Amino acid sequence: MTKRYHHILIPLDGSPLAELALADAFSVAELSHAEVTLLQVVPPIDHVIATEADHPIFVDQQWEAKKMMARDYLQGVCERAGCPDVAVHLVVEMGLAAETIIDYARHHPIDLIVMATHGRSGLQRWVYGSVADKVLRGANQPILLVRAYPQQEGTSG
C-alpha cells in the first residue's frame, strides 16, 4: 500500500537549521507530485515603535513590513533550494509559532507537515520550548521531523 501526499506544509523560522528540512520535504513532494506550502510565522506585534514623537510606526505598518520581509525570505529560500518542479505557495502568518502552524494545517488541505527539530535538549529545551514537539502533539496530520544540527567545522554534509 502506497501513501500519496497532495499538499505538504514546511514551516520555516528563518534559520539555516530549519531549512535543513527542505531536502526531505521536496523529495517527498516530487515522489508524490504534491504541492508545497512554505510557511513563516511572524511573532505577534504587541507594541507601537515610536521613531519620533510625531511619527510613530503603528502595528499595521509593522505587520506589513514584517510580512514583506518574510515573503522575501521565503522567495529567497525557494531560489536557493532550487525548488523542484512542484507547485510552491509562500505564506506568512502572524501568531505564536506552534499554535499558528497547527491552526494553518487544520484549516487548509495539508496532509503532511515536514519540519526540522533544532536538537535542543535539557535546560535549553525547557527554556525555549520546542515548536516541533508542540506541533507533533497538536497537529492531526502526519509529521516528518528532520533532526537538524549545525554542520560541524571540518566535516562535509
Image: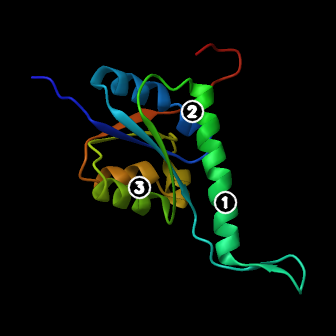
Q: Which residue type does callout 2 highlight?
A: Cys
**Residue 92 placed where, x, y %?**
53, 55
79 is higher (above) or lower (below) than 70: above
Q: Secondary structure at mark 1?
A: helix
Q: Which residue is mark 2?
A: 78
**Residue 60 placed where, x, y %?**
64, 74
Instruction: Name the quadrant containing residue 65.
Output: bottom right
**Residue lying at 36% horizontally and 53% vertically, measured from the top left:** 135
62 is higher (above) or lower (below) than 113: below
**Residue 145 placed where, x, y %?**
38, 37
Q: Secondary structure at mark 2?
A: helix
**Residue lying at 55% horizontally and 35% vertically, measured from the top left:** 19
Q: Which residue is mark 3?
A: 101
Q: Callout 2 environment at 10 Å: few (<14), some (14 to 19), or many (20+)? A: some
Of labels 2 and 1, earlier in sequence is 1
Whether residue 16 is visible: no
Q: Which residue type does callout 3 highlight?
A: Ile
Q: Callout 1 environment at 10 Å: few (<14), some (14 to 19), or many (20+)? A: some
Q: Which residue is mark 1?
A: 66
Q: Which residue type does callout 1 highlight?
A: Lys
**Residue 111 placed where, x, y %?**
26, 42
Per the model, the C-alpha gap separating discs 2 and 3 is 19 Å
156 is higher (above) or lower (below) than 55: above
Q: Quadrant of the N terminus?
A: top left
Q: Secondary structure at mark 3?
A: helix
Q: Is residue 78 left or right of residue 1?
A: right
**Residue lying at 44% horizontally and 22% vertically, measured from the top left:** 85
